[in-house]
Image (spheres, helix red, strand yellow):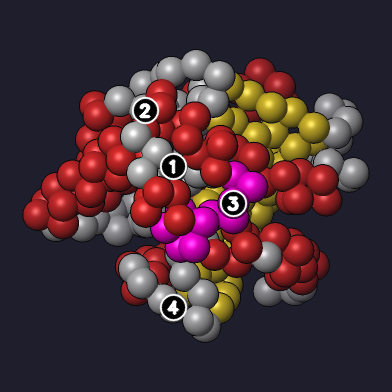
Amino acid sequence: MIWHGFGDRSNSVILLIHGVLTPWTIWQEVIDHYSRYYHVIVPELDAHTLSEPSSYTSVEDEADKICRCVNMLNGGRIHMICGLSMGGRIAAAVAGTPGISVDRLVLDGAPLLKLPKMLRNFMTNNYIKLIARSRRREPKVIESFKRDFLPAKYLDDYLKITDNMDEESVRNMIGSVFGWEMIKRYDDGLKILFMHGTRGNESVSRKAAVRLKTVNPQTGIRCFDGYGHAELLCREPAKWIEEVDRWAGADQ
C-alpha cells in the first residue's frame, strides 16, 4: 500500500478509498475540492500500486493498514471516509474498528453482501481473463474500458495496475469482498450515505443499501436512475461532490 496526502496536515482528515482495477487517481477532482479545507489521505490499495507490484491479501488486511496509518497520523480520528465499490467495503470495515472515530461514512456501490460461490468463481475467472487481455493491449478491451468502465484519461493508470496484478491477488480480492456479509451496527452518531445506480449489477448495491439502513436507521440512500456501478464519481465527479456536500450539510 502506498499513501498520498493533500492539504494541511493540521486539518481534519478525509479518507478516500478506490475500487477494484481503479487507480487512486480516480479521486483527483474530489482531492482538489476537499484538500482546501481538510487533510485528504488516499491510499493505493495493495495489488493496485502503480509504481511497483504488490499483493492483496484481504479486506481486513487493507483495513488494518489504513487504521494503523490513521492512528499514527491523526490519533484515529477521521472526519469522513468515502469508499468506492470494493473501497466501500474496506471503508465499512475501518469505520467499525475499535479506536477509530469516524463522523461520516460515504459508500458508493459498496459490495457489503455475500455472493454465492459459483458467482464468485465466475467473477474471479472473468477478472483474470480481463487482466490478461489488458496486458496484451487487445483493442476490444481498450475500447470497452473507455466506453463502459472509466474515462480514457485513466487508461494508462489502469494498464499499470493490470501489468502489476497477480492472479492470487484477484482470487483474494473476490473471496474477501464477496465471501461474507459486511453489515454491522454502527454508533448512532455515525452519519452514513449509501449511493448507487440502477444499471447492471447495481441491484447488489441496492440490496446492500436497504440492508444497511435496516440495521443503521441513520443511513441515507441516494439512487441515481440510469447510472451504472460507480459511474457518477467516475464520469461526473462534480455532481458526486455536490451530492456528498448536500448530504453532509443536511440534518438527518
From the viewer's perspective, is 97 left or right of 138?
right
Residue at label 1? Answer: 21
Q: Earlier in the sequence, mark 2 or mark 1?
A: 1
Residue 201 vs residue 191, the one in the foreground:
201
Q: Nearer the viewer, mark 3 or mark 2?
A: 3
Q: CA distance from mark 4 to mark 3?
A: 23 Å
Q: Give the Cα separation between the discs numbered 4 and 2.
A: 29 Å
The residues bearing labels 3 and 2 have C-alpha atoms spaced at a distance of 20 Å
214 sits left or right of 225 in the view: left
Dot 2 and dot 1 residues touching (CB under 8 Å): yes
Which comes before the other along the chain, label 4 or label 3? Answer: 3
Binning the other alpha carbons within 10 Å of mark 4 as few (below 14), some (14 to 19) or many (20 upward) gives some
C-alpha distance separating marks 1 and 4: 21 Å
Q: Amino acid at mark 2?
A: Met
Q: CA distance from mark 2 to mark 1?
A: 9 Å
Q: Main secondary structure of the magenta part?
A: helix
Q: Is residue 91 above or below residue 242?
A: above
Q: Secondary structure at mark 1?
A: loop
**Mark 4 sits on what residue?**
198
Identify which residue is drawn at 54% across, 65% down: 231
**What percent of the width, then of the height, locates residue 58?**
33, 31
* Tag shown at residue 152: 3
User: What's the residue type where badge 1 is placed?
Assistant: Leu
Q: Compared with residue 166, is residue 199 higher up or lower down, i.e. above or below?
A: below
Residue at position x 51%, y 75% from top? 227
